[in-house]
Image (spheres, rainbow, N blue to C red):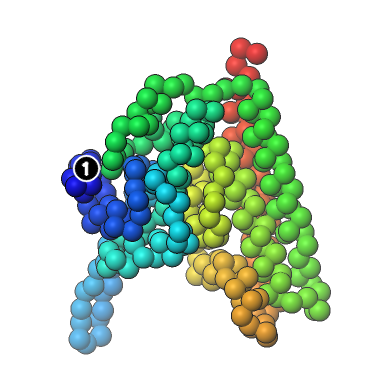
Amino acid sequence: MKKSKIKDYNNTVEHNVISQLLELVSVHSIYLLQISTEKNSQIINMPPTNKRSKIIKSYTLFVITYKPISKNLGLLMDDLYNKTQQKYRVYLITMVLSTAIKELNYGSNFLLNILKRTPCVFKDNDNLDKFIGFGLLYHPNFYEHIHRVWKNRMQRANYWISMVYVDDSKEDEFVNLGMLNYGLEQICVALIYVFWEFNPSYYSLPYLMHLCSHFSDLPQAYFLKSTYQRKRTFYLLSNARNQMRFKAFQEYSSHDSKKAYNLCEQFLQEATTIGEKQLSEIKLLHYKGK
């Protein structure tokens, strides 16, 4: 039975999470990229007095499947959250086994780092074990490709953010927030490729920010664990395109757009600094001995 193949890493990942995932997807193997725990406590002083606490664990899992997942990845992650009684938030990165083998044969530092460095919490067979002994790939051509991806993504990000005219009273605030959303997405994807050499297949701003939080504190500092006002701004940015689709009349002011624009400009500058620093570091590895 597949559930018997769940690995025990000191209960690093709750068996319920893995079991529910096995019910929903045809899984070959699962790797743990990140685990975090948040505790929400309340002390109520007005009668009836009470104390409440809720612990939510979140996991980032890389899942190799036998077949493509038919369901939208966001809906699948929501299903897991609900099926675990909203105790566990699971962020998934998925890849079909045949694609993983093809990329490993060609050369993928992203996949090699997962196989070499992350705990495997479930494995149906040992098909990928032969790749663990492979070395990471460093060559000037690979670096130049990474640099081109970074440059093109950041140029797009600059374009989207510069398109916002926050002082123009004729502008639609939904449109402004939507363009800023596109700009932030490009920044996130650029950072993910520079740090991981990986292109996400699922685009949701909270999801992309979560992936970036694996290698930088920037998402938390600006959006995810910041002030109430910044969290509200991030909510507006994350939902801007749906608002454009389903609402004919805008509900936000130019003040909202201006705050979002200023925040995105700052985020862009900080991300550029972080990305350029990482590029300098990996350039040394790719050009070593050349």
Q: Is residue 118 left or right of residue 4?
A: right
Residue 274 figure quarter: top right
Judge whether 7 appears above or below 48 on screen. above
Q: Is residue 186 left or right of residue 88?
A: right
Residue 169 figure quarter: bottom right
Can residue 275 be seen here? yes
Q: Is residue 51 left or right of residue 35?
A: left
Residue drawn at the location 57% of the way across and 22% of the way down: 138
Q: What residue is disc 1 on? A: 5
Residue 262 x/y as whole percent: 68, 62
Q: Secondary structure at mark 1?
A: helix
Residue 114 figure quarter: top left
Q: Is residue 14 left or right of residue 181?
A: left
Residue drawn at the location 78% of the way across and 76% of the way down: 171
Q: Nearer the viewer, residue 227 or 161?
A: 161
Residue drawn at the location 58% of the way across and 41% of the way down: 193
Residue 52 x/y as whole percent: 23, 72
**Quarter holding the C terminus?**
top right
